[in-house]
Amino acid sequence: MLKKVKAIYCDGTFIPQDPCYLPENAEVELTIQVASGYAHTVVDRETRKEILEALLHRMRQTSMMANAHRVTISE
């Protein structure tokens, strides 16, 4: 099933702006499209890598991501 949901990123968590009606602990795949004003503010490849690794670490700590085995982030 493919459904587009807008979300706000806050304190390491994506907060959906619309109801999702998913069962508890449902595994989802996120495709992140950042507003153009934010897309190129961090140009250093190592810094971007550190930010993405920190993001994945925080996501895995949330109850929704506890059972996730694969997360893909495209730049």
Image (cartoon, rainbow, N blue to C red):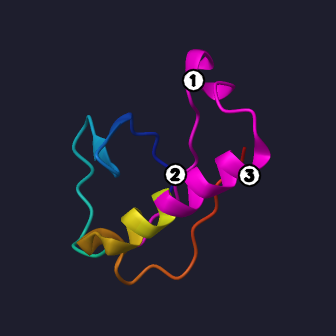
Above-or-below relation of 16 to 24? above
Kind of residue at badge 3 = Glu
Is 35 inside the magenta-drawn segment?
A: yes
Q: Is residue 63 left or right of residue 41?
A: left
Which residues, given as a range, are shown in magenta? Answer: 26-54
- Image quadrant in which you'd find residue 68: bottom left
Q: Position of residue 43 (x, y in %)?
A: 74, 33
Residue 46: x and y, percent?
Answer: 74, 52
3 vs 1, front mark:
3
Name the N-terminal-most of marks 3 and 1.
1
Q: Amino acid at mark 1?
A: Tyr
Which residue has dot 3 on it?
46
Residue 53 vs residue 61: left or right? right
Name the one closer to the observer, 28 or 66: 66
Q: Residue at x 38, y 64 (%)?
A: 58
| Image position, residue 4 (x, y; %) | 46, 40
Position above or below: 21 against 28: above
Q: Is residue 21 magenta?
A: no
Sequence-first tag of 2 and 1: 2
How far is mark 2 from mark 3, CA to CA? Answer: 32 Å
Q: Choose mark 2 or mark 1, whichever is in front.
A: 1
Q: What amino acid is labelled 2 in the image?
A: Leu
Q: Secondary structure at mark 2?
A: loop
Rendered image: mark on residue 38: 1
Mark 1: few/some/many CA within 10 Å (<14, 14-19, 20+) = few
The image's mark for residue 2 is 2
Residue 40 visible to the viewer: yes
Figure quadrant of residue 42: top right
How many dots with numbers? 3
Q: Quadrant of residue 40?
A: top right
